[in-house]
Image: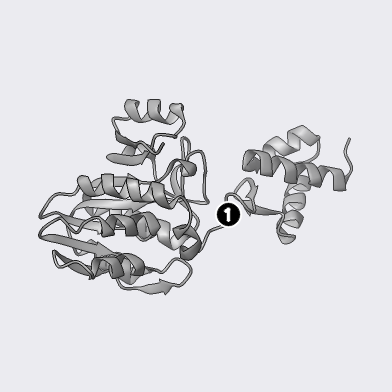
Amino acid sequence: MLNTIERRREIVLQTEQHGKVSVKDLSEQFEVSTVTIRYDLNELNKRGLIVRSRGGAVTSNRLTKELSIREKQKDNYRVKQLLALKVASLINDGDSIIIDSGTTTEEVAHCLAAKEDLVVMTNGLNVANELARLDNCDVYMTGGKLRHKSMSFHDSHAEERIQSFNFNKVILGVDSIDIKTGISTYFEPEAKLNRVMCKSTQQIIVVTDSSKFGRSALHSILPLEDIDILVTDNKIPKDFIELFAKLNVELHLVETD
């Protein structure tokens, strides 16, 4: 049997490898009590080696690290441009839409210049700045508390603001997509606001690059079957393609090669 140091080292390695671990599985694997495993996880969490979650833990760098808006702008930029062009093609003149905060959705806003008579609401300051350059749409902000890291607004005021409108479409950028946990994000108030967005619209359009697939963040937004349209690149895993077909999700794969 491993000693405490060896066991905790193995827990960190397994968390890094699998993305998440459960108290039950670790207890059975190391043949120690669940109380011992919980104590291990709490100690590792204090040291920043893992992040404690309900029933287990997740890795402290891959699943819980959130890039700032400036860092995200540099990530897969060309792919985001191609995805944005495709999403813009799904928007019709006269649509009323919500555009979620994010760098991919900022690119979508940039691609709406050719559309006419749009009504657009956003919780993203960067998205609003992009929309302000256009003469073809009425722009609304959700208001609320500004989160500087993502340049996005949230809180109950933002939620109430959204609920006072009826939209045709929501364009939702996401941090993580997993077969079991659906769409998720790192910031709980953002997840709550995204759910309000989805309930206030007729059609949910999700846009994200393939690097977000197979990941699971801490806070769930909605299950995969609730998506109407998904726009991503052609490098997503085949099991997701098969699943979206079964769920009748309209899938648009953008060629990036």
Visible in this render: residue 227? no
Res 113 quadrant in image: bottom left
- Disc 1 on helix, strand or loop? loop
Q: Residue at x 29, y 54 (%)?
A: 108
The reply, left or right, for residue 231 in relation to residue 42 is left
Residue nearest the observer in this picture, 119 or 77: 77
Residue density around tag 1, few if under 14, some if 14–19, many if 20 or more, within 10 Å: some
Query: Going by the picture, which residue comes out furthest to the front?
Result: 257
Visible in this render: residue 86? yes
Q: Residue at x 18, y 49 (%)?
A: 91
Residue 81, percent across and down? Answer: 35, 51
Q: Residue at x 42, y 31 (%)?
A: 240
Q: Residue at x 24, y 64 (%)?
A: 121
Residue nearest the observer in this picture, 242 or 182: 242
Res 138 quadrant in image: bottom left
Residue nearest the observer in this picture, 220 or 119: 119
Residue 175, percent across and down? Answer: 46, 51
The reply, left or right, for residue 106 in relation to residue 43 is left
Residue 126, percent across and down? Answer: 35, 67
Placement of 155 over or under 36, stated as above or below: below
Mark 1 = which residue? 64
Please identify the quadrant where the C terminus is shown. Answer: top left
Which amino acid does the dot numbered 1 rest on? Thr
Please identify the quadrant where the N terminus is shown. Answer: top right
The reply, left or right, for residue 212 in relation to residue 46 is left
Residue 250, percent across and down? Answer: 27, 34
Placement of 161 over or under 103, stated as above or below: below
Placement of 68 over or under 58, stated as above or below: below
